[in-house]
Amino acid sequence: MSTDNQPLTTQFGQIFHEIDDAVVEFEIDNGEPIIVDANHAFRDIFSPDMKRVIGLPLNELIVPTDKQAEAQQFDERTADGRTNVAFVERTTTEGQKTFLYRGIPTGDKCGFAIYTDVTGELQRQEDLSEIVELATELGETTEGETAATATRIKRLATGLLQFTDDVEKSVEASLD
């Protein structure tokens, strides 16, 4: 909440509601994040009824049962005024998906949570791994130009995989 006791979304309404990522403003009450406001992207991904989410515990709405301890750690960090960045699994209207989560404290036990869906990116990473395996197999079972092309494909796909691994490690390191 802002110092004048209005939600920050009142001050930053256009940004909050225009951003493509799912964003929720919350207050931590008795250790639990309670939804103060949520943008349309949040509603589209997590709950078709926007009015239903205001005032609800955020974790009960979107955190899978087996991820509650992880979410509690994020809540504690936020209550202490520390930012969170991680890849997380959350329950959506379409099932469980993977998100780049950024928790940003905005004051005394309140903040924003931003969720960027990276489920498709993870699928592309799996596809790259499969390309590396196929290129390796092709390079080992052929000769000449075909083997050379397979080796080049493997090198390029491996480079892309390394890049995505480096990004993931960077996100995980930001929690330290």
Image (spheres, rainbow, N blue to C red):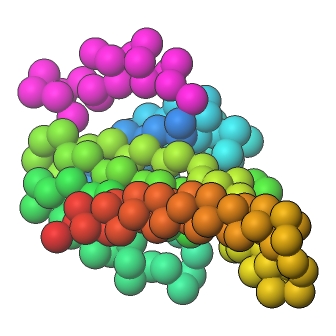
Instruction: Look at the image and say whether residue 12 sits in the magenta stretch.
Output: yes
Looking at the rendering, the stretch of residues picked out in magenta corresponds to: 1-20
Foreground residue among 140 and 24:
140
Residue 164 image point, x, y percent: 50, 60
Residue drawn at (10%, 61%) of the image: 80
Left or right: 79 in relation to 119? left
Residue drawn at (49%, 48%) of the image: 115
Instruction: Look at the image and say whether residue 98 sits in the magenta stretch.
Output: no
Height in image: 86 above or below 51? below
Asked whether residue 62 appears in the rendered view, the answer is: no
Number of labelled discs? 0
Asked whether residue 105 appears in the rendered view, the answer is: yes
Residue drawn at (35%, 68%) of the image: 169
| Quadrant hosting residue 68 | bottom left
Foreground residue among 146 and 79:
146
Left or right: 60 in relation to 139? left
Residue 138 image point, x, y percent: 86, 78
Residue 126 image point, x, y percent: 71, 70
Residue 70 image point, x, y percent: 38, 78
Give the quarter of the figure containing the N terminus: top left
Give the quarter of the figure containing the C terminus: bottom left
Height in image: 64 above or below 174? below
